[in-house]
Image (tube, rainbow, N blue to C red):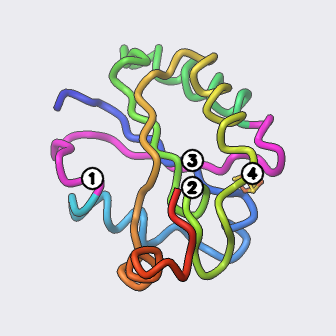
Amino acid sequence: MDEKYVVIIQCDIAHRRCSGFACTDTFYNKEGMFENYEENTKYISFTCGGCCGKGIAAKLEHFARRCRKVNINKDEVVIHLSSCMVTDNHHYDRCPHVEYIKSIVLKKGYKNIIEGSYLSKNATKKREKGIYTSY
Ligand code: SF4
């Protein structure tokens, strides 16, 4: 893969209790959803900005300006919507604004969008058993 930047967009509510350690660690260990990225792929994480996710537009604009300065174009960026945003899990159900947030990401010119980041084994099992909803 020739992606130069991975962006994880985290749920702002989840961020109040989660440092993002598991997602970051999984990225640097090249595990799970991040296993195919190259060693030199860069990584950044920021939150949606709070419900309803409208604030993500300004953050992506700022990110794009910075990327332009180092010759990284939007096609070389992959946006991961974090597992805390897109799955049903112990703390929260899927964000009710996911489709709206995706529409903003697309409108800002980022076409590479992946749902998920670090996946807890326990929550994955519970989704398989139907205890948590699968989307
Ligand atoms: S918009 Fe969704 S992802 Fe963002 S804080 Fe609200 S529930 Fe979380």
Give residue 67's position: percent from left, percent from top.
46, 22
- The relative height of residue 101 versus residue 96 in the rendered view (above or below) is above
Query: Of marks 3 and 4, which one's residue comes earlier in the chain?
Result: 3
Label 4 CB, ligand 1: below 8 Å?
A: yes
Residue highlighted by disc 1:
34
Q: Which residues are magenta?
A: 33-55
Q: Main secondary structure of the magenta part?
A: loop
Viewer-closest of 88 and 114: 88
Q: Secondary structure at mark 2?
A: helix
Residue at 44%, 54% (x, y): give it.
Answer: 116
Residue highlighted by disc 3:
9
Q: Residues within 10 Å of mark 2 (few under 14, many from 20)?
A: many
CB within 8 Å, label 1 to label 3: no
Give residue 60's position: percent from left, percent from top.
62, 29
Residue highlighted by disc 4:
96
Amino acid under disc 4: Pro
- The relative height of residue 103 versus residue 53 in the rendered view (above or below) is above
Query: Of marks 1 and 2, which one's residue comes earlier in the chain?
Result: 1
Q: Secondary structure at mark 4?
A: loop
Viewer-closest of 126 and 82: 126
Left or right: 19 as drawn, with respect to 126: right
User: Could you give the CA–CA distance between mark 3 and mark 4, rounded to whole angstroms?
Assistant: 15 Å
